Image (cartoon, rainbow, N blue to C red):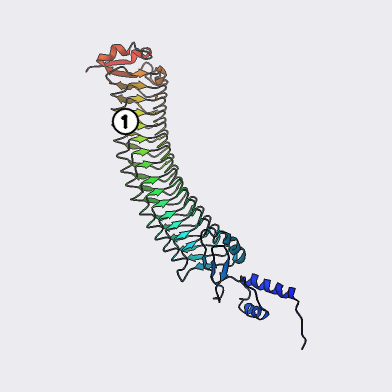
Amino acid sequence: MSEYIIQGGTLTGIADAIRSKAGLSQTFTPAEMIDAIENMEAGTSASLSSVTFSSNGTYTPDAGYDGFDRVVVDVPVSADAGYSLFAETVQGTVSFASDPGNAVSSICKYAYYARNILEAAEFNAARTIGSYAFAECPNLSSVYFSACSKIMDYAFYSCPALTSVHFPAAETVGSYAFRSCTRLQAVEFPSATVISAAAFFGCTSLSTISFPSVESIGDGAFLGCAISEINMPNLLRTDASAFGACPNLVTASISKLSVLNSRVFGNCTSLASVDFPAVITVSTNAFANCRSLVSVSLPVATVLSDNAFVSCLALTTINLPAVTSLGSNAFSACFALSSVSMPALETIGYACFARCSSLDSVEFPAVTSVNANAFSGCASLSNAIFPSLSVLGNYAFRDCVRLTSLYLMGSSVCLLSNANAFTSTPIGGYSTTAGQFGSIYVPESLYSLYIVAAQWSTLSSRFVSVPA
């Protein structure tokens, strides 16, 4: 029997190989090396059954292993130094992460970031998931956190295999928490009150959401998602583009919301019906390019800002009983719009109804100011009634080629910025039938003043006196 002498350097190399393979850190005696080698699982990369980091970022493996089939991590959020050591040790070896003893109270920042093989995670005691904790885990498909109350920013960012999540206790979802989880189909957050900016942005397969308690939704939180219906009875605030560009969204009903922020539903091309009983302000581009929108219920809204409903191509009827102000292009290019009722409206903004080519007749009993280009290009408009109008802007009715009747029934002469308000209209001299032009109807008491008033005098032949 031959005897071989192994140099110390060789033993050190063997020990290093064992530590690397088994994910261990302790020193070995030669006899202990044999035991460690026997405990290795042949043909696979070893992983640890349990890893606990101390506050200084070091870890100590538990005694004994269970086939290297899981890794449990409990790392204080402050122990970020531990992330690097852990990643170098078990990167690519973790397929299932859990905490069967309910000992883990939080998942630290970067704890499982970019873990190549991780497929599922279940932590029933963890209350916080740190920033980037599971970000860019390409195979992570299932997660369950029964006690988690706070999901930090980017926690599950870009996990392309994730299909469903359930967080029964989560109250806050951080910014970009699930951004670009392109296979995520359903989310359930019964306790969540805050959804931060871009939390689900780019989740292009997300079709089912449940947020019965949510009160605040940040910028672009669901931008580009596949959801078809929104029903959030406790929602109080949405920021810009919260539901923007959701191509499958058909209906939206939110009972407590008072402000629709800019682009909140912009470019939702399938949106057909909206009901917002408490909304007072509709901000810029709130429903811009919602080309399927046919039903709008905003019973207490008072302000519609610029481009609020621009290019809503299917909108035929609008009834806004409380609106007092319309911003620029509010209904511009709503080609199917044929009926408008706004009894409280006082101001019509720039190009507000421009190119509403199906609009035939309008009456605005409370309007005092019509801004430039307000009805420009309304090719079907033949009759306009303004009992209270005091200011009419440049090109207000330009290219209204069928405008034959304008009623100005206020108690004083309306200020006309320029006679170009009637360019290419029958009132301004354009006529499809030779010798037939439009008429401006004014109170009998003001007739003599209108025909000599600045700008109006060039249209003196168009005036018709109406008895009191």
Q: Secondary structure at mark 1?
A: loop
x%, y% of residue 64? 55, 77
Image quadrant assignment for residue 261: top left
Give the number of marks: 1
User: Which quarter of the image is occupied by the C terminus?
Assistant: top left
The single residue placed furthest to the bottom in the displayed view is: 1
Image quadrant assignment for residue 293: top left
x%, y% of residue 370? 36, 25
The single residue placed furthest to the front in the displayed view is: 56
Q: Nearer the viewer, residue 10 or 141?
A: 10
| Number of residues whose C-alpha sits closer than 10 Å to that of mark 1, classed few (under 14), some (14–19) or many (20 or more) | many
**Residue displayed at 46% across by 59% down:** 128
User: Which quarter of the image is occupied by the N terminus?
Assistant: bottom right
Which residue is disc 1 drawn over?
345
Looking at the image, residue 29 lies above or below residue 166:
below
Q: Is residue 435 left or right of residue 63?
A: left
x%, y% of residue 437? 36, 18
Inspect this view and state whether residue 181 appears.
Answer: no
Looking at the image, residue 262 lies above or below residue 138:
above
**Residue displayed at 32% across by 32% down:** 324
